[in-house]
Image: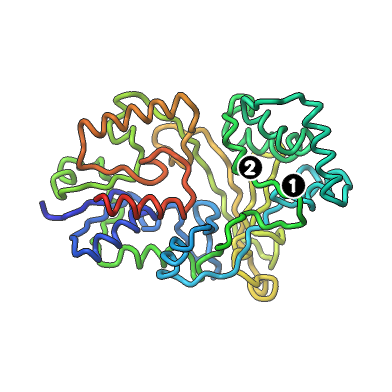
Amino acid sequence: MKYDLLLVGAGLYSGVIANKAVKSGKKVLVIERRDHIAGNMYTGKVENINVHVYGPHIFHTSDRNVWNYINQFADFNRFTNTPVARYKDEIYNLPFNMNTFSRMWGVKTPDEARAKIDEQIKAAGITEPRNLEEQAISLVGSDIYEKLIKGYTEKQWGRKCTELPAFIIKRLPVRFVYDDNYFNDPYQGIPIGGYTAIAEKMFDGAEIKLNTDYFSDRKSFDECADKIVFTGMIDEFFDYELGELEYRSLRFETEVLDKENYQGSAIVNYTEASVPYTRVIEHKHFEFGCSQQAVKNPKTVITHEYPATWKRGDEPYYPMNDEKNNSLYLEYTKLAQAKRPNVIFGGRLGKYKYLDMDKVIIEALADAERI
């Protein structure tokens, strides 16, 4: 064994483990099939603007220990996520809050908003939500569901809302205050200089091989280290022996515009089903104080984000955590324990679940101790 640890994939999860392993005196090899480290949080420079190449990443957490941990690798700005939603020619604030309700119904007080939502929930007659549509209506009523949730969600997941599990929509905060801060977490921001610099510090001391696919020579890679951390798709690792897990993919179209300010917000969601993309990202607005500084750049960079059905060869972004897929994933974990006990599966794909960045860090730190 030439190395103590082989990390397959150079994203955030691997970065946390690499940092711990190197500090413990371990010899670490990292292989990454892309031509860069940092995984999906990778940021690159375009027109002197930090571009979130694989979609927007806003770091947020309620865990002070996690906040302290990530701050050892970067200073964070004071960015607050306040996205807006566009339905036809109407603009609404997100998350669903008093600004949203006032724009939707002309109400002015929390009591008026609650009364309107309660009226619509009562009319729907929902007692125990069985799917995403019923869950959404039971939270915010039929008007907001039809305008701001249904089209966006069905584009994002490629399924009717009646076919999606109810728990997905529970991630959306609903507030009866005039507060557009999307996250309830007390710690939030964007690393100054972008996320790639964080990854560079995390992987410092490890040997890194880019443009290297584990599956191109897996026998040699399996033999080069005592333990392996695999952050790709667990079903692909076992050559889909038990069947394919389902994922959602994304397609990004990024362009430079000759204007200072395109949409006035970092993120605008397009909630109509007839609009093929789910959102438009204007990257310069992730920089705190952009209204005074970043917009002075005479150019701006925008990205249209298109959801897509995943097929082999595509980049998987989100697991489809319905009952069928979760059951299949559990069978793969049993297979892993029986056949490859020296392999730790991590990250969104290895653990087959949606994880925000702070949760990735929590799980990686725990797995690092286990390793």
Q: Position of residue 23 (x, y in %)?
A: 25, 66
Q: Position of residue 309 (x, y in %)?
A: 51, 33
> At 29% across and 25% down in the image, what residue appears?
241
Q: Which residue is mark 1?
A: 86
Q: Which residue is mark 2?
A: 277
Instruction: Give the left or right position of residue 211, taking residue 352 as reference.
Output: left
Residue 245 versus residue 59 in the image, above or below: above
Q: How many marks?
A: 2
Specify the quadrant of the image occupied by residue 208. bottom left
Say which amino acid is labelled 1. Answer: Arg
Crowd tier of the residue under label 2, counting other residues whose Cα lies within 10 Å: few below 14, some 14–19, many 20 or above: many
> At 88% across and 47% down in the image, what residue appears?
107
Q: Position of residue 34 (x, y in %)?
A: 36, 51
Residue 158 versus residue 297 in the image, above or below: above
Q: In the orientation shown, which residue stands out farthest toward the left?
A: 1
Work out whether residue 197 or residue 171 is closer to the camera in this orientation and state it: 171
Could you tell me which secondary element the residue under label 2 belongs to? loop
> At 53% across and 52% down in the image, what residue appears?
55
